[in-house]
Image (tube, grey):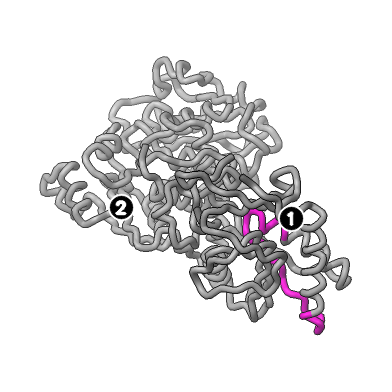
C-alpha cells in the first residue's frame, strides 16, 4: 500500500515481466523452469554492470552472511562466489576441508549445523558426493547453493555458460552446442544439458565411447563419436577437461591419442564455422582439450565465462537471499 | 473506484512546462543530466530530455537508474524485485543531475536513488522532477519540479500509465478495497 520503494506485492500495474523467484535453494538446473532460468540470466546482466563501476559494490545483501563450504579444491568457483558476495556487501566465510575438523572425522551434517549455528544465511557448498547439496538443504535452515556435487550438477556453471553464449548469439533457441570430452564424469556437462535443453538448444555430446554415459540420449541430446564430421554444423564448441584426478580406469589409450581425436587444434578449427564460440569451464589442459592458440584465439570466450561467473553468482545470491520459500 | 487525474494531453503539457522551467533555471547553459528512475521514470526522462533539446537546442546527457539494489526494505517485502540494468554513461563527478520519477510518495525511492548515484561519484547537485506529488513523505525529501500535486489518502493508489509500457497515457487514482488490495 505504498510507493515504489515500499513494495506492494499485489500491485497489478507494477509487476515485472518475468516470474518472481521463490526457490530457497539452487541445487540443480534439472529442477528449474525455463522462466526461472530466464530470471537469473536477466538479473545477471544487471549485476554485470556493477562490476564495471568505480565503486564495485551495491548494498543489496548488506548484513547477510554467506559461508563457502568447499570440500573439494577450487580456486575459480570459490573466489567467484566470494567476490559475488562481497560485491553485494555480504559477509563471507571460507571453509575448506583441509585444515578443518573434517580431517578430524566430523560429518557433513555436523559441519553444516555448526556453521548454521553462527547464523549464516546462505551456504555455498562443493562436495565430492553426488546429491550432497540436496542432503545439506534438508539438514539446515539456511539457503543452499550447489557449487558442484560429485558428478551430479554444477548449476551456476551452466547458468554462466548460457549467459556467455547469449552475449554472443541472439538467442539460445535452435543453437547447436557440442560438448566434447569426458561427459561421463562431468557435472558441468550435466547441468548444461539440463539447462540448455530447457531453453531450446540442440545439445550434442561427443567423445570416446568410454566417456559417454549410457543412454544419455534420454536427456534429449545427440551422441556423436566423430568430431570432425559434426564440427561444420556447430555454433558453440564446449570443451571439457580430461579429469586426470578422477580416472582410476583407463578410458582411452593415451593423452596423445585423445588430443589427436578430440583436441581442438588450429588445423581442426579450419573445419569449424566462422563465428563458432570456444568455451571451457577451466582449468584448461593446454595441448590436450585444446591448443594454446585456440584457447587464446578470437573465438574463445573462456575469460568472459569467468567474468560472467561473478555476475551470475551475484544474481543467484541476490535471488536466494530474497526468496521466502515455497 | 478510480478517478482520472491527468489525460494524455495534460501529461504532455505538464512535461513541456517542466522542460521550460529546467532550461530557465539553468540559464548559464549547463543543462543537468536527466536520469530516469526505472521503470516509468525512464520513459518520462526520455520525453523530458527531448523537450529540453527542442527548447535549449542541445541534447542533455541521459541515464537510467534501477534502485532495487538500494532499497531499504529488500528483506521485508514478500517477493524479490526484478533488477534491471542501470546505465549512467557519463561522469557523475561534478555533474548536475536531474532525477526523474513518476510519483513522489514516501520519498524512499528517491533516497535509494541518491545512494545509487553516490556509488558512481559525487554529483555537483541533484534536482528532482516528478510527474505527481501525492504527499505522505516519510523522509525529508522534496521535488524541485512537480507536474501536479494530488492530495491523496493512504487508502488510495496512484497509477501512472505511459504509452511506452501500458499502451496509453494517463494518471489514475484508485481506491483500495477492504483487505488493502487495489481493485483491478
User: Which residue does the image show at 25% across and 45% down from the upper left?
Assistant: A141
Residue stretch rendered in magenta on the structure = B25-44
Left or right: B166 with respect to A64? right
Q: Is residue B168 above or below residue B88?
A: above
* Mark 2 burial class by Cα count in 10 Å: few <14, some 14-19, many 20+: many
Residue B158 lies within the magenta run: no
Q: Position of residue A9 (x, y in %)?
A: 49, 46
Q: What mark, if any, has residue A121 been given in the picture?
A: 2
Left or right: A272 with respect to A82? right
Element assignment for label 1: strand
Q: Nearer the viewer, mark 1 or mark 2?
A: 1
Q: How many marks?
A: 2
Q: Quadrant of the N terminus of chain B?
A: top right
Q: Are marks 1 and 2 in contact (CB under 8 Å)?
A: no
Q: Quadrant of residue A149?
A: top left
Relative to the observer, which residue lies in front, A59 or A223?
A: A59
Tell which subunit mark 1 falls on.
B
Residue B26 lies within the magenta run: yes
Tell which subunit mark 2 falls on.
A
User: Which residue does the image show at 64% across and 81% down from the upper left?
Assistant: B124
Q: Quadrant of the C terminus of chain B?
A: top right
User: Which residue does the image show at 40% across and 32% down from the upper left?
Assistant: A186
Q: What mark, if any, has residue B42 been given in the picture?
A: none
Q: Quadrant of residue A89?
A: bottom left
Q: Position of residue B125 (x, y in %)?
A: 64, 79
User: Which residue does the image show at 56% across and 40% down from the upper left?
Assistant: A18
Q: Position of residue B158 (x, y in %)?
A: 61, 54
Q: Is residue A175 above or below residue A325?
A: above
Q: Is residue A214 above or below residue A138?
A: above
Disc 1 marks which residue? B6
Q: CA distance from mark 1 to mark 2?
A: 46 Å
Amino acid at each position: 500500500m505504498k510507493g515504489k520503494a515500499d513494495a506492494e506485492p499485489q500491485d497489478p500495474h507494477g509487476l515485472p515481466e518475468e516470474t518472481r523467484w521463490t526457490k530457497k535453494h539452487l541445487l540443480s538446473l534439472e529442477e528449474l523452469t525455463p522462466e526461472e532460468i530466464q530470471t537469473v540470466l536477466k538479473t545477471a546482466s544487471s549485476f554485470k554492470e556493477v562490476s564495471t563501476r568505480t565503486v564495485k559494490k551495491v548494498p543489496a545483501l548488506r548484513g547477510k552472511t554467506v559461508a563457502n563450504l568447499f570440500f573439494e579444491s577450487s580456486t575459480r568457483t570459490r573466489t567467484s562466489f566470494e567476490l559475488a558476495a562481497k560485491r553485494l556487501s555480504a559477509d563471507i566465510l571460507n571453509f575448506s576441508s583441509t585444515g578443518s575438523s573434517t580431517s578430524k572425522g566430523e560429518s557433513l551434517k555436523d559441519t553444516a549445523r555448526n556453521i548454521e549455528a553462527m547464523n549464516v544465511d546462505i551456504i555455498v557448498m562443493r562436495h565430492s558426493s553426488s546429491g550432497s547439496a540436496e542432503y545439506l538443504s534438508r539438514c539446515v535452515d539456511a539457503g543452499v547453493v550447489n557449487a558442484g556435487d560429485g558428478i551430479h550438477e554444477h548449476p551456476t556453471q551452466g547458468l554462466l555458460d548460457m549467459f556467455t553464449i547469449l552475449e554472443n548469439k541472439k538467442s539460445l533457441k535452435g543453437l547447436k552446442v557440442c560438448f566434447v570430452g569426458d561427459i561421463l564424469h562431468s557435472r558441468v556437462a550435466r547441468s548444461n544439458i539440463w539447462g540448455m535443453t530447457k531453453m531450446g538448444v540442440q545439445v550434442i555430446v561427443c567423445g570416446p565411447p568410454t566417456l559417454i554415459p549410457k543412454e544419455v540420449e534420454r536427456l534429449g541430446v545427440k551422441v556423436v563419436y566423430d568430431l570432425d564430421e559434426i564440427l561444420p554444423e556447430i555454433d558453440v564448441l564446449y570443451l571439457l577437461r580430461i579429469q586426470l584426478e578422477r580416472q582410476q580406469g583407463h578410458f582411452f589409450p593415451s593423452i596423445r591419442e585423445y588430443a589427436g581425436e578430440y583436441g581442438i587444434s588450429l588445423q581442426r578449427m579450419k573445419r569449424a564455422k566462422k563465428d563458432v564460440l570456444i568455451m571451457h569451464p577451466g582449468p584448461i589442459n593446454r595441448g590436450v582439450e585444446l591448443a594454446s592458440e585456440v584457447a587464446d584465439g578470437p573465438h574463445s570466450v573462456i575469460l568472459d565465462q569467468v567474468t560472467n561467473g561473478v555476475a551470475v553468482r551475484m544474481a543467484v545470491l541476490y535471488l536466494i537471499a530474497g526468496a521466502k520459500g515455497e | 473506484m478510480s478517478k482520472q487525474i491527468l489525460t494524455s494531453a495534460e501529461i504532455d503539457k505538464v512535461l513541456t512546462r517542466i522542460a521550460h522551467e529546467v532550461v530557465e533555471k539553468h540559464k548559464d547553459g549547463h543543462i543537468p543530466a536527466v536520469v530516469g528512475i526505472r521503470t516509468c521514470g525512464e520513459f518520462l526522462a526520455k520525453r523530458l530530455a527531448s523537450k529540453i533539446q527542442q527548447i535549449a537546442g542541445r541534447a542533455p546527457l541521459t541515464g537510467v537508474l534501477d534502485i532495487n539494489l538500494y532499497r531499504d526494505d529488500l528483506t521485508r517485502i514478500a517477493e524479490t524485485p526484478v533488477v534491471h540494468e542501470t546505465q549512467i554513461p557519463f561522469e557523475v563527478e561534478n555533474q548536475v543531475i536531474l532525477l526523474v520519477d513518476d510519483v513522489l510518495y514516501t520519498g524512499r525511492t528517491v533516497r535509494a536513488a541518491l545512494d545509487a548515484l553516490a556509488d558512481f561519484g559525487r554529483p555537483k547537485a541533484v534536482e528532482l522532477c516528478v510527474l505527481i506529488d501525492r504527499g505522505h513523505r516519510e523522509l525529508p525529501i522534496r521535488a524541485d519540479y512537480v507536474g501536479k500535486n494530488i492530495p491523496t489518502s493512504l487508502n488510495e493508489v496512484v497509477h501512472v500509465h505511459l504509452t511506452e509500457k501500458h499502451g496509453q497515457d494517463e494518471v489514475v487514482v484508485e481506491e483500495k478495497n477492504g483487505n488493502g488490495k487495489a481493485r483491478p
